[in-house]
Image: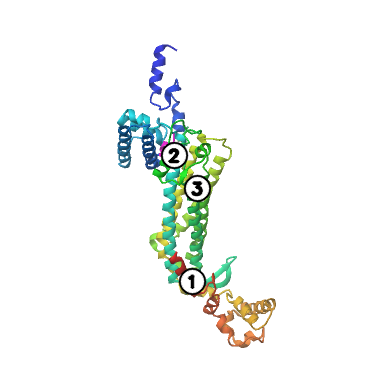
Amino acid sequence: MSHNTNETMKDQTDSKLWGGRFSENTDAFVEAFTASINFDKRLYKHDIAGSQAHAKMLQKVGLLSTEEAQAIKKGLNEILIEIEQGKMQWSIALEDIHMNIEAKLTERIGLAGKKLHTGRSRNDQIATDIRLWLREQIDHICSEIQRLQQGLLILAEQEAETILPGFTHLQVAQPITFGHHLLAWYEMLVRDKERLQDCRKRVNIMPLGAAALAGTTYPIDRAYTAELLGFERPANNSLDAVSDRDFAIEFTAAATLIMTHLSRFSEELVLWTSAQFNFINLPDRFCTGSSIMPQKKNPDVPELVRGKTGRVNGHLISLLTLMKAQPLAYNKDNQEDKEPLFDTVDTLLGCLRAYADMVPHIEVKPDNMRRAAMQGFSTATDLADYLVGKQLPFRDAHEVVGKAVAYGVETSQDLSEMSLEELQQFSDTIRADVFEVLTLEGSVAARNHLGGTAPEQVRTQIAAARNQ
Ligand code: ARG
């Protein structure tokens, strides 16, 4: 290699912040293949916040002069504005968000910009960025969950006395109140939020200072950086800090459960809007039509939410698989954590938003619900319980009611529609007071204990939920 050729190559590799030991340019395809800027640019705000705190700490411990720290602060603030105004030119050659911003900073402020990376690595930087970002997203998700919960409470209060059939095996089982049914969804979301808040504790630990993997030789003050960034504390082990993504996996697992809950809820909304159930109506603004069948009004929002559950489940498997065979410490594999994580958050926020907007506007059709509860002998258990009250052992009572139901099927009438004489064919202990328990209202009102379906319990639960 002539001296001349060598010089030219050196020029070409100068554009890379790590170009010093390289003697030829990165292959153009490899450059694009290894770059993450197209997706990690969305971490810009958190990357800048991390750098601001790092620079402040470097100044505190004497590694940057006041002027240098000031220049970095100002330069980063200007870059932040430039990005938010959509004026930043992102470069694939600069690979990722960290080097894009650092190069821009040096271009703006010169020498001080080159000092920012003292005592850190992109390995602890990216781990910090993701944690800062995810912490913010968790808070956002929790407030959307809360908004959906508020909607459920409003509707549950309105429908505290509305009766519909409760199902097991999708067969009519016992009458329940619609308020009670809605509160079941509320409870699942309580746990979903708790899971996120618990996960947040482990997200909120600071990797910075771990540097590439072993820590750094500079006299850094990690507790100070952690405090500036609102982290609970710095991570205890530098290898662990740069390498594990268990916090992202844990978050995604919590997300899959939320999606699973929303998906089951969706399934019910889809069923309930069908002509066969006809229990509810979703306002037109949450539905779409068919391009060929003019009569159609489709529950697209619940269907899509149900469908999107699949991709979030997929992201959980992606992240678990990404992690499972990685030796310590950081490996480039970890760059693949972002897209599944970002999409999990986007999908979840979209679904929660749609539901929080839609749920308070669900139109209930109480007459249809009631009619359905009248079919399918939903008060059969109440008749058995009544007979137990008249000293029949439960198994015998079960048998008696079974026969009465068979008679009802034969004569096409509900238990409550039979005359006293008809009912007495099956047990002579039955008296006129039986009709109080055979009504739908009597049935639900009788389940008046903590967790039961009685309207009074629904109201108690709503009040307790609002108190929290
Ligand atoms: N883009 C990288 C990631 O997402 C940043 C860390 C790169 N570190 C490295 N040594 N190549 O994980």
The one nearer the camera, 240 or 162, is 240
| Label 2 residue SS | helix
Horizontal side of residue 387 vs 88, given as left or right: right
Q: Distance between the residues labelled 1 and 2?
A: 50 Å
* Residue under numbered circle 3: 202
* Image: 449 above or below 112: below
Quarter in which the C terminus is drawn? bottom left
* Residue under numbered circle 1: 458
Q: Do the residues labelled 3 and 1 touch (CB within 8 Å)?
A: no
Circle nearer the viewer, 3 or 1: 3
Circle nearer the viewer, 1 or 2: 2
* Residue under numbered circle 2: 222
Q: Are marks 2 and 3 in contact (CB under 8 Å)?
A: no
Q: In which quarter of the image is residue 93?
A: top left
Q: Which of marks 3 and 1 is nearer the N terminus?
A: 3
Find residue 74 and report its horizontal and vertical position in percent. Answer: 30, 37
Q: Earlier in the sequence, mark 2 or mark 3?
A: 3
Q: Which colour scheme is used?
A: rainbow
* In the image, residue 37 lies in the stretch drawn in magenta: yes
Q: Earlier in the sequence, mark 1 or mark 2?
A: 2
The one nearer the camera, 281 or 13, is 13
